[in-house]
Image: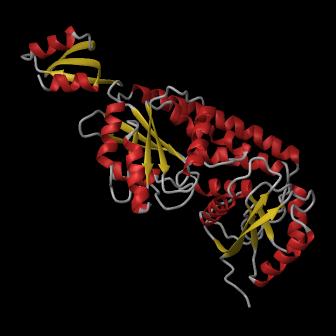
Amino acid sequence: MGHDPSVTRTWVLHPDIKSNNDRRLPEPALAEAVALAEALPGLEVFGETIVRLPKAHAGMLFGKGKIEELHNVFDEHEIDLVLIDGPVTPVQQRNLEKAWGVKLLDRTGLILEIFSDRARTSEGVLQVEMAALSYQRTRLVRAWTHLERQRGGLGFVGGPGETQIESDRRAIDDQLVRLRRKLSKVVKTRGLHREARAKVPFPIVALVGYTNAGKSTLFNKLTGAEVFAKDMLFATLDPTMRAVELPDGPQVILSDTVGFISDLPTELVASFRATLEEVLAADLIVHVRDISHEGSEEQAADVRSILTSLGVGENANQIEVWNKIDLLEPDDHDAVLARAARHEEVIATSSMTGFGMKDFVQAVELALEGEIIAETLVLPYSDGRKRAWLFERSLVEAERQGENGFELDLRWKAKDRAQFESL
């Protein structure tokens, strides 16, 4: 029987290798790999298997018997693509593709495909291309024709009629040099944008977190902006910025960043540093966690280590949001609320139901109380008392006389402004 050619029938394997020192818990790891696969348009997951191995076999990854057994499964379900949640060497990839008669992608290849599908800004696109090239350089794999792509794709998941990637290492290196040049231009203009934004008087609040922790939903709740918030891994790849007026505090710029992920392949860590540079410029980092996930602690540790590698210090202004509290069983729900209440920098929320949003906004306001806001104020000439108050506190940077009164350039904190407004 034939099957719908527009759908790539996919099977996900998680090799649980005993000899690996940094083994992840196989069940949640497999679930995450399936969610990754589902984040790529055109793939349909027909099955998933944890393959337990004492050690990886050099040429084939798996043993003979296991390869035969899986071959029968893939044949029976007419599988086009096998995703292996882990690293696969070029030799293993070739041998397995030949043994099974399917196309194979490893974890890095899959994440690259997703990044390629999601990158929106010119910088994001360049970053992905560079990561893809450094990955390709090690394997120079054949393109495959199962997925029709609206976009050019990366060649791992090629368009119809695409033949072998006919590029040798030198061609790839030339391309990398070109991309690096382009990227440094883009990053320079981003730098200029950032400087321009540094002149923007508002504090920047960056939402960070493990992929699928609910950052975009939280972002939408706060901004009313329809950011791409699907229950999908990597739904956000380019930092999305919105200005938000907090009820009792300053106006802030909210920045939603790409989701973090465990074992992010090295080619990608370098690629996405720039996408996360927004975080370094932030006045407040909000670490959003899916507290209902069984691996929540491990995920949080991953996020912290990526932040550290980016240069975010221990003393950075941070708060933690324990999100998706609505998904917990009643007992766990109460225990988590009690735990959160013991830490003033932790807020329990559900960005779906809106629970805890008020506390969250208050926590942001409190954390930003010390941030300097720059703005220009026009005071009627008759308002000498307020003008004197501002000068007494050395809050005025510059003053001009305009048509409607004194134009004052101020640098002050939210609480100065609140006091001033109560005069």
Q: Residue furthest left?
A: 382
Q: Nearer the viewer, residue 115 or 312?
A: 312
Q: Nearer the viewer, residue 54 or 144?
A: 54
Task: Report how many numbered discs are placed on residues in the image.
Answer: 0
Q: In this view of the protein, which residue sits in the foreground, 175 or 222?
A: 222
Q: In the rendered view of the protein, which quadrant contains the N terminus? A: bottom right
Q: In which quadrant of the rendered image does the C terminus lie? A: top left
User: Is 123 on the left or on the right of 106, as rendered?
Assistant: left
Colour treatment of the image: secondary structure
Q: Residue at x 15, y 14 (%)?
A: 387
Q: Position of residue 151 (x, y in %)?
A: 63, 61
* Residue nearest the observer in this picture, 308 or 114: 308
Is 374 above or below relative to 346? Answer: above
Q: Is residue 89 visible?
A: yes
Residue at coordinates 21% horizontally, 19% vertically from top-left?
A: 407
Residue 411 sits above or below residue 131 on the image: above
In the picture shown, does residue 33 fall above or below 346?
below
Q: At which x and y percent is residue 59?
A: 93, 59
Residue 170 screen position, x and y as percent: 87, 43
Q: Is residue 143 visible?
A: no
Looking at the image, which residue is at 27% across and 19% down?
410
159 lies left or right of 324 = right
Residue 7, image x, y percentages = 66, 76
At 40% from the left and 36% from the top, the residue drawn is: 345
